[in-house]
Amino acid sequence: MKRLVTIAFACALALQIAPVLAEEPQVTWIDASCRYFVVKLPESDEPEKFGLFSARVPPMPNTGDQLKGSMTAIETQLENLTTGQIHNVIHWADAKSQEQLVHLASEKCAGAPGEQH
């Protein structure tokens, strides 16, 4: 009986935590060769739903990681809620679609071969 109560409690707790984590910005695309990544921004009234960032130094977040921190500052630190790591990043742009930012990141990578971002 105690085991059943413990399982029920754990399930109830997981259901309460899951929506909180789902609201955090999430990495949706990465280009490890140039250290660029796209984040789905938190829900807001703004038309821009995605942000383009670059990691100043490794480590980089992975696709699916959830991040916490300023999504508007140009240079900032983001806490990776998935791994516990801290990422020093540059915020380059926001856009309505991920594809716009992937295209921009590809142009930046191609325009600066060998340059460290």
Image (spheres, rainbow, N blue to C red):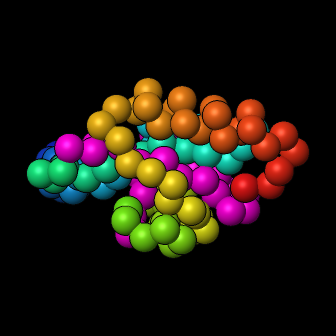
Whether residue 116 appears in magenta in the rendering, the answer is no
Residue 100 screen position, x and y as percent = 43, 31
Quarter of the figure with the C terminus: bottom right
Left or right position of 29 against 98: right
Residue segment shown in magenta: 47-70
Residue 18 screen position, x and y as percent = 23, 49
Q: Is residue 2 visible?
A: no
Q: Is residue 114 visible?
A: yes
Whether residue 60 appears in magenta in the rendering, the answer is yes
Pick out the residue farthest to the right: 114
> Would you identify the image quadrant in which residue 86 lies?
bottom right
Q: Kindly identify the residue that appears in the image at 27 percent across and 45 percent down.
A: 48
The rendered magenta stretch, by its main secondary structure, is classed as loop
Left or right position of 12 against 70: left
The image shows residue 77, relative to residue 42, as above or below, that is: below
In front here: 37 or 23? 37
> Would you identify the image quadrant in which residue 36 lies?
top right
